[in-house]
Image (spheres, helix red, strand yellow):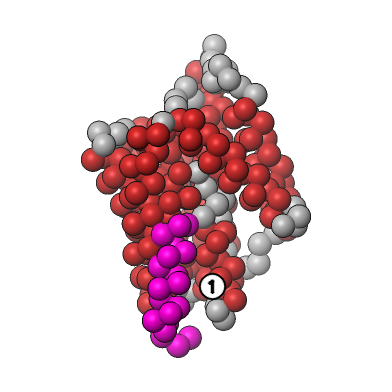
Amino acid sequence: MADPTISEALTLLALSAMAGFINVMAAGGSSLILPILILMGFDSQVANGTLRLAIFMQNVFAVQSFRQEEFREFKQSALYSMFALPGAIAGAFLAINIADELFQMILGGVLMLIVLTIFFNPRREPLFADNPTLGNIITYVTLFFVGFYGGFIQVGVGVLLMLPLLLFQNMSLVRVNLHKVTIVLIYTVPALIIFGWSGNLNFKYGLILAIGQAFGGWWSAKVQIKTGERFVKFALAIAACILSLKLFKVL
């Protein structure tokens, strides 16, 4: 693959900044980048791997932005990450092969479930509120499978990560996003190593994407802390609907 031209670099910077903002605010920003990389001549595995460098930097800056605003719960995020991490490693190894379309159809249904959960659970009480131990167990098991998907495909994983935290844990959407970006940051490290080791990473293009998504992720964390949960709720619902329609081949 030839080095990026100036016009390509500027275009990727702008789009990746938008993707980083969307990813940290809700999810689905990566669906803007992967098709573009493939249209530019990357095969799906290299596009998938190249995106991981941008995802890593995006979440480094997002976590730091949350910390600057005094939002930090690293111990809890690290606990969640320990369950997502093994799944992500397994998924990254499997990602060398083509994605399963049936799995994507199931994912589309899950995303629509998230939208219904957001808007038809106004009391925001977690499921199994009377049995928090069971709720925690289900959360941890779900995070393993979400981690697997994140290591495998990555696109849309933010919505899936938010699902168990919204359904089974009593926390605001802003706190959910804080945990989301930390979990993705941690499991992206081994996924990035696996893609790089297998030769499915273009560092030059990945660095351009990383700069854009780092800025977008940093700014998104600032915006959602200032605007609060209502804005995040609608952003998440829109992202989930779009991703679901894409997975069902409607868009």
- Residue ID at (48%, 36%): 232
Please say if 140 is above or below 220.
Answer: above
Please say if 172 is above or below 125.
Answer: below
- Residue ID at (62%, 35%): 114
Residue 45 in the image, given as x and y percentages of width and height = 56, 71
- Residue ID at (58%, 46%): 239
Extreme-top residue of the structure: 130
User: Seen in the image, is 69 located left or right of residue 146?
Assistant: left
- Residue ID at (48%, 86%): 1
Residue 86 in the image, given as x and y percentages of width and height = 47, 49
User: Seen in the image, is 62 located left or right of residue 232?
Assistant: left
User: Seen in the image, is 153 located left or right of residue 73?
Assistant: right
Q: Camera-side residue: 234 or 56? A: 234
Q: Inspect this view and state whether residue 20 appears.
A: yes
Dot 1 corresponds to which residue? 37
Please say if 222 is above or below 215.
Answer: above
Say which amino acid is labelled 1.
Answer: Leu
User: Seen in the image, is 98 located left or right of residue 250?
Assistant: left
Q: Which residues are magenta?
A: 1-19
Q: Quadrant of residue 225?
A: top left
Magenta-highlighted stretch: main secondary structure? helix
Residue 66 in the image, given as x and y percentages of width and height = 30, 40
Q: Camera-side residue: 83 or 106? A: 106
Verify whether residue 182 appears in magenta: no
Helix, strand, or loop for circle 1?
helix
Q: Camera-side residue: 222 or 147? A: 222
Residue 8 in the image, given as x and y percentages of width and height = 45, 78
Q: Inspect this view and state whether residue 80 appears.
A: no
